Image (tube, grey):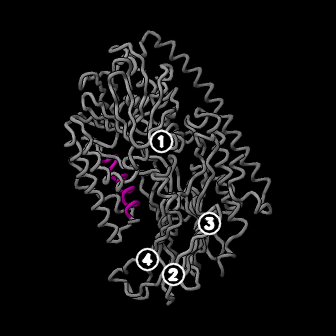
């Protein structure tokens, strides 16, 4: 209904209608849907076959975790793209245990990773999971959410997270289905019931987490989580270490955030990707890369270089410093160039 | 020739058909992700023959090799911003001219990305598009004798967390309709009377209309620049009928032949009926 009312053409050009061609198009979509239903039925049949074959295998072997500080646990993701083999386990995910309850920070790139994180938590504590916090909308951080739906936890995220999930979620689901196949079975997008605007605190029982919602930087829904007790900071993807930073929000916004980021009273940071490291020195490599990228793009724009060519040039001097450089640098340069053209 | 004459039923109906495809896609999304995902793009038959029939009313398409070229990266690095350059070149002994170029992204929800009506000296058009999937991209040039010539390239979808969506929706909204016009310096070895290059940029979210509002559970209506026209003095240089496959903040770079006019004029209209206008002096000294 709202689509009909909004396409802007419904009342103006009835004279252009061509019933036959529309009929063909409708028929095409009917056929597509019918094909999909057949494929879906076939997939279900195969799935049951596979399930009965591997029945002996435990589906919830716990993720490997490290206790970074007292009561702060992290599973470090691998520096790769999400694949069926790594089950989407490329981002750092973790949890903090208070006197009364547990908070989960990001849930991984598949339901399976989410379940394995839950198993890791249960191996440490039987306390209820009170909060599931998503640091932003990217699939490697939110695809495991549904694994925690039965725990009665409140989902927490940036006030922009619902919008980001709705704008991008369906695309992520279909794009990663193509790459990861049935490893993505069961993924559901779970929007946060509690939305953070500015700063907020969550209590786990004598243990307070300070949440900070950021203006558009790495993405438009970045949230950091500081464990006050141990001064451990979960940065989400506002910080990358070793894994090349990914610009999916605003390069200028990200560079502008460094001042405030560095003031967070933390001792140790857990980046969204990469190893834990002393804060705020953790920021240095990323800041150098992003400043290089911005300077290169500005020079190329001033010279009149077209975007396609600029994307192959900006930031390339940083190549030796980063993992996954080939996978992301041209993409970063493209986004940065398009943004900085408006300066 | 006026731009108004260019806006024929056929053009509008193309965009409308794209929107209808969009609606079907939106309904599929509403039915659940299981319907939209498994191998839809990868395994379905080549949509081009039917698309071509739909878009060009069953007219014959000749091989555009050597006449219309598409430059795109083999891999779409950022799904939201994929640069595409169209170059048209007729053999020197061919007296026809290029009238229009239609850009089609076969696997996108609204495949017709844009139709460009081209004026004198417009042999290159560069813009940025959204790419949803592994797809063929077609450019179809219509010549002054009415013949159609088609070329194609294949583009791989981007990896990672790249999505064909706005990166900074609030900023796009806040600056709606802002325009920039840039004229590039002529290459040092070209003739003074030769083609020049310019670029138009306009701030617009160019929403696809596929997103679902989590609060109202209704689909956000499509909201995009549907027409953009550029004049040199009173002479049309380039016009675009665009759709939602054009990236946020539409950006068009093009060549043209200077006609002695002193001003450039640009006018854009979006789907909500907003009209955005700008005027800039021709920088003769460049």
Tell me if label 2 and label 4 are in contact, CB under 8 Å.
Answer: no
Write the residue at 34% across / 41% down.
A237
B168 left or right of A333 in image:
right
Write the residue at 24% across / 39% down.
A265
Q: Same subunit under labels 2 and 4?
A: yes
Q: Which residues are magenta?
A: A325-340
Quadrant of res A313: bottom left
Tell me if label 3 and label 4 are in contact, CB under 8 Å.
Answer: no
- Kindly identify which chain the residue marked by label 2 belongs to: B
Front residue (pair B153, B32): B32
Front residue (pair A272, B190): A272
Q: CA distance from mark 2 to mark 3?
A: 20 Å
The secondary structure that dominates the magenta segment is helix
Q: CA distance from mark 2 to mark 4?
A: 13 Å
B124 left or right of A250 in image:
right
> Which mark, residue B197?
4
Q: Which residue is mark 2?
A: B264
């Amino acid at each position: 209904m709202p689509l009909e009312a909004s396409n802007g053409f419904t009342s103006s050009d009835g004279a252009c209608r061509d019933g036959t061609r529309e009929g063909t198009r409708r028929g095409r979509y009917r056929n597509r849907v019918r094909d999909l239903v057949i494929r879906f039925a076939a997939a279900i049949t195969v799935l049951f076959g596979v399930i009965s074959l591997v029945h002996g295998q435990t589906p919830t072997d716990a993720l490997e975790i490290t206790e970074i500080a007292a009561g702060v646990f992290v599973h470090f993701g691998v520096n790769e793209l999400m694949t069926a083999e790594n089950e989407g386990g490329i981002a750092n995910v973790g949890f903090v245990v208070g006197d009364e309850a547990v908070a989960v920070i990001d849930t991984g790139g598949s339901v399976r990773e989410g379940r394995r994180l839950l198993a890791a938590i249960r191996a440490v504590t039987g306390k209820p999971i009170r909060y599931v916090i998503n640091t932003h909308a990217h699939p490697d951080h939110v695809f495991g959410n549904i694994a925690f739906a039965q725990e009665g936890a409140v989902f927490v995220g940036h006030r922009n997270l619902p919008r980001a999930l709705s704008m991008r979620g369906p695309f992520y689901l279909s794009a990663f289905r193509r790459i990861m196949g049935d490893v993505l079975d069961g993924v559901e997008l779970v929007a946060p019931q509690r939305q953070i605007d500015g700063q907020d605190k969550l209590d786990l029982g004598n243990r307070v987490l300070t949440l900070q919602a950021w203006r558009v930087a790495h993405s438009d829904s970045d949230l950091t989580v500081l464990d006050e007790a141990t001064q451990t900071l979960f940065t989400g993807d506002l910080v990358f270490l070793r894994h090349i930073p990914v610009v999916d929000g605003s390069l200028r916004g990200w560079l502008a955030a460094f001042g405030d980021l560095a003031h967070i009273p933390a001792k140790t940071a857990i980046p969204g990707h990469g190893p834990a490291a002393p804060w705020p020195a953790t920021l240095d490599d990323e800041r150098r890369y992003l400043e290089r990228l911005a300077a290169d793009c500005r020079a190329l724009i001033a010279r009149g270089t077209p975007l396609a060519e600029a994307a192959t040039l900006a930031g390339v001097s940083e190549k030796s410093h980063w993992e996954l450089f080939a996978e992301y640098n041209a993409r970063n340069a493209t986004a940065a160039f398009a943004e900085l053209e408006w300066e | 020739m006026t731009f108004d004459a260019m806006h024929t039923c056929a053009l509008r109906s193309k965009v409308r058909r794209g929107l209808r495809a969009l609606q079907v896609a939106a309904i599929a999304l509403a039915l659940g992700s299981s319907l939209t995902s498994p191998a839809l793009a990868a395994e379905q038959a080549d949509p081009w023959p039917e698309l071509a029939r739909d878009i060009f009313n069953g007219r014959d398409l000749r091989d555009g090799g050597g006449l219309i070229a598409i430059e795109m990266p083999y891999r779409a690095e950022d799904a939201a911003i994929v640069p595409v350059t169209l170059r048209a070149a007729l053999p020197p002994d061919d007296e026809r001219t290029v009238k229009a170029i239609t850009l089609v992204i076969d696997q996108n929800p609204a495949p017709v990305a844009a139709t460009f009506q081209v004026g004198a000296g417009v042999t290159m058009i560069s813009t940025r598009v959204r790419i949803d999937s592994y797809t063929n991209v077609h450019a179809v040039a219509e010549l002054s004798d009415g013949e159609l010539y088609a070329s194609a390239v294949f583009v791989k979808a981007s990896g990672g967390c790249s999505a064909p969506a706005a990166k900074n929706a609030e900023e796009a909204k806040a600056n709606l309709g802002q325009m920039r016009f840039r004229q590039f310096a002529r290459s040092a070895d070209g003739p003074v009377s030769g083609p020049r290059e310019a670029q138009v940029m306009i701030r617009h979210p160019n929403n696809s209309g596929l997103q679902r509002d989590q609060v109202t559970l209704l689909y956000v209506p499509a909201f995009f620049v549907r027409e953009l026209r550029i004049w040199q003095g009173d002479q049309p240089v380039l016009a675009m009928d665009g759709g939602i496959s054009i990236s946020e903040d539409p950006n068009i770079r093009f060549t043209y032949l200077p006609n002695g006019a002193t001003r450039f004029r640009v006018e854009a209209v979006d789907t909500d009926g907003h009209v955005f206008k700008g005027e800039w002096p021709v920088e003769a000294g460049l």
